[in-house]
């Protein structure tokens, strides 16, 4: 049997290499080699890291958080830590999303452990990069759902400001609430994020007036909390299904108006075919999301 090749580094050098890689996780391999002042090849260094259960992974993408953001998120989680699934079923989740005909994001790699330790390290602030918008033809949509009851999908063809947003709510949210009332469902909690049109004075005034008339309240929402909004997962499902069912979507040609027309037709069909089991699963995940946020002290979670 052939003898294995002896190690060429000391245990101290190994520990320094691993510690540096984990502390400065976004360093390229060549820079990591230079900082650690190692004379060996990058391939050898990569092998040593792997032997210590560390390798490059794609950086998780999340909205960029500050200490203040994390503190607000943690306060929100602590306030809702005792909410049951039945209580979450009273929340009407809402949001806008831009559905692009295609997207191509640059991959960033980070150093972290494999296995259970690596899963924890994945969402540390140093291992996460903020999402950035890019170009391309896209269709803006607004939607909502509560419990296992899907709300309307609305196609938006203009810039969203407070006036446009309140019009969307007036023409769609109120009709949805009326439909729920027809099933003897009242006192819902309306959820929206902190986008400028949502927190504008005209919007807040509309919500206060309509809330009294239609018996709904508005949930106070923590900043940069896409991981807490169940409808974000619904958007992901919608976009995944769009390209799975219609793989030619990213190759659509023609004017922006023509491409958007096709997107609308396809998205409308997929939206109304979303099953109740999907919606139930999203709502039932809320206690776990809240717990994960508390465990992360308000920072990034796996959701």
Image (cartoon, rainbow, N blue to C red):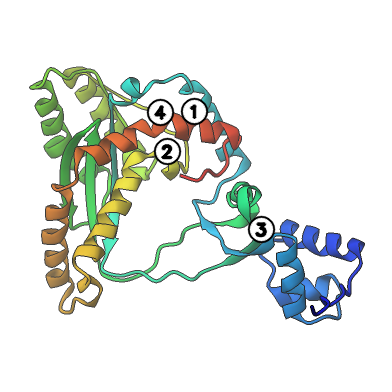
Tell me whether circle 2 and circle 1 mark residues in contact (CB < 8 Å). Answer: yes
Q: Which numbered tag is attached to residue 228?
A: 2
Q: Which numbered tag is attached to residue 112?
A: 3
The answer, for residue 200, to whether it is visible in the render is no
Q: CA distance from mark 4 to mark 1?
A: 8 Å
Residue that appears at 12% across and 17% down: 184
Residue 70 in picture, x, y percent from top left:
57, 38
Residue 135 in picture, x, y percent from top left:
35, 70
- 258 lies above or below 161: below
Q: Nearer the viewer, residue 198 or 126?
A: 126
Residue that appears at 41% across and 20% down: 83
Q: Nearer the viewer, residue 162 or 5?
A: 5
The quadrant holding residue 187 is top left
Residue 217 in picture, x, y percent from top left:
29, 22
Q: Which residue is mark 4?
A: 220
Q: Which numbered tag is attached to residue 76?
A: 1
Nearer the observer, disc 3 or disc 2?
A: 3
N-term mark: 4 or 1: 1
Residue 180 in picture, x, y percent from top left:
13, 25
Nearer the observer, disc 3 or disc 4?
A: 3
Q: CA distance from mark 3 to mark 2?
A: 25 Å
Label 1 Cα neighbours within 10 Å, binned few <14 / some 14-19 / many ≥20: some
């Amino acid at each position: 049997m052939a003898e294995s090749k002896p190690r060429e580094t000391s245990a101290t050098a190994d520990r320094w290499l691993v510690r540096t890689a984990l502390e400065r996780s976004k360093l390229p391999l060549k820079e990591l080699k230079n900082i650690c002042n190692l004379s060996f090849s990058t391939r050898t260094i990569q092998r040593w890291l792997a032997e210590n259960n560390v390798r490059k992974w794609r950086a998780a993408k999340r909205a960029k958080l500050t200490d203040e953001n994390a503190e607000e998120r943690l306060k929100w989680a602590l306030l809702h830590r005792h909410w049951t699934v039945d209580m979450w079923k009273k929340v009407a989740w809402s949001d806008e999303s831009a559905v692009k005909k295609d997207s191509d994001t640059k991959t960033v790699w980070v150093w972290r452990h494999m296995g259970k330790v690596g899963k924890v390290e994945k969402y540390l602030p140093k291992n996460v990069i903020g999402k950035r918008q890019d170009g391309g033809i896209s269709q803006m949509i607004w939607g909502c759902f509560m419990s296992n009851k899907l709300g309307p999908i609305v196609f938006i063809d203009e810039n969203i400001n407070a006036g446009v947003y309140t019009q969307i709510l007036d023409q769609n949210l109120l009709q949805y609430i009326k439909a729920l009332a027809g099933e003897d469902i009242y006192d819902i909690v309306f959820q929206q994020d902190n986008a400028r049109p949502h927190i504008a004075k005209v919007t807040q005034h509309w919500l206060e007036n309509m809330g009294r008339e239609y018996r709904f309240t508005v949930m106070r929402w923590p900043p940069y909390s896409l991981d807490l909004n169940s409808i974000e997962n619904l958007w992901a499902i919608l976009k995944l299904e769009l390209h799975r069912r219609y793989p030619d979507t990213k190759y659509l040609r023609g004017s922006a108006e023509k491409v958007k027309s096709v997107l609308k037709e396809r998205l409308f069909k997929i939206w109304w075919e979303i099953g109740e089991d999907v919606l139930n699963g999203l709502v039932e995940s809320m206690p776990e999301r809240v717990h994960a946020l508390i465990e992360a002290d308000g920072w990034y979670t796996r959701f």
